[in-house]
Amino acid sequence: MSLADVKYLPETPAHDPEIEAINDEAFGPGRFVLAAYKIRQGGPHERALSFVAVDGAIVVASVRMTRIAAGAGRALMLGPLAVRPAFKNLGIGRRLVAIALEAAAKAGAPAVMLVGDEPYYGPLGFKRLARGHISMPRPVDPDRLLAHEIVPGTVARLVGEVSHADQARIAEHIAAMA
């Protein structure tokens, strides 16, 4: 395998079984109890902003984006990012993040947040969120809440509990009807 053989493509429904296998391999069944997974259960991810890396016909890595809300703020949540073990430490994950961030900016997303390690994501433009600005639906180490601001000032609008944007729209609709 050569890195020149790896192609980066928009995710399609045909990739779903392989993406699920990669996520299972990378995170195991414990992923279903994580805060980010709970948020992703609230609605679909943005397939147009999600990407795969393929070697031939095999998906070797994947990154997904999901629309989120926290208070008046809106953003995308990056994740999961997963790379098959045989393809780790080659820069494939970093390249997928860069592609996803570029797509998010082109789509007009104001910011991208994630739960992850600052040493990995920091060089990709992510900074730690100020403590106490947001909360997650399940426990998370606050030092792992990171954001990449695309439109200046938008991260400050992310306040309160993070939810899938679809869930926030439903709550806003119900409140408006009351």
Image: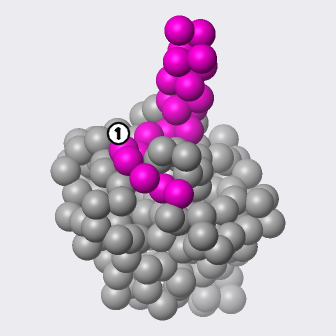
Magenta span covers which residues?
157-178
Q: Amino acid at mark 1?
A: Lys
Residue depicted at x 39% and y 84%: 120
Left or right of residue 2, residue 164 in this image: left
Q: Nearer the viewer, residue 29 or 125?
A: 125
Residue linked to disc 1: 38
Q: Tell me which secondary structure the magenta stretch mostly adopts.
A: helix
Q: Quadrant of residue 107?
A: bottom right
Count of marks placed on residues: 1
Looking at the rendered image, the quarter that the N terminus falls into is: bottom right
Asked if the magenta segment contains residue 75, the reply would be: no
Q: Quadrant of residue 163?
A: top left
Residue 136's place in the image compared with 25, above or below, is: above
Q: Position of residue 117 (x, y in %)?
A: 32, 77
Residue depicted at x 55% and y 51%: 73
Q: Position of residue 166 (x, y in %)?
A: 57, 32
Residue depicted at x 49% and y 39%: 164
Secondary structure at numbered mark 1:
helix
Q: Position of residue 10 (x, y in %)?
A: 72, 59
* Residue with the most extreme right position: 106
Residue 86's place in the image compared with 63, above or below, is: below
Mark 1 closeness class: few <14, some 14–19, many ≥20 residues within 10 Å: some
Residue depicted at x 64% and y 57%: 50
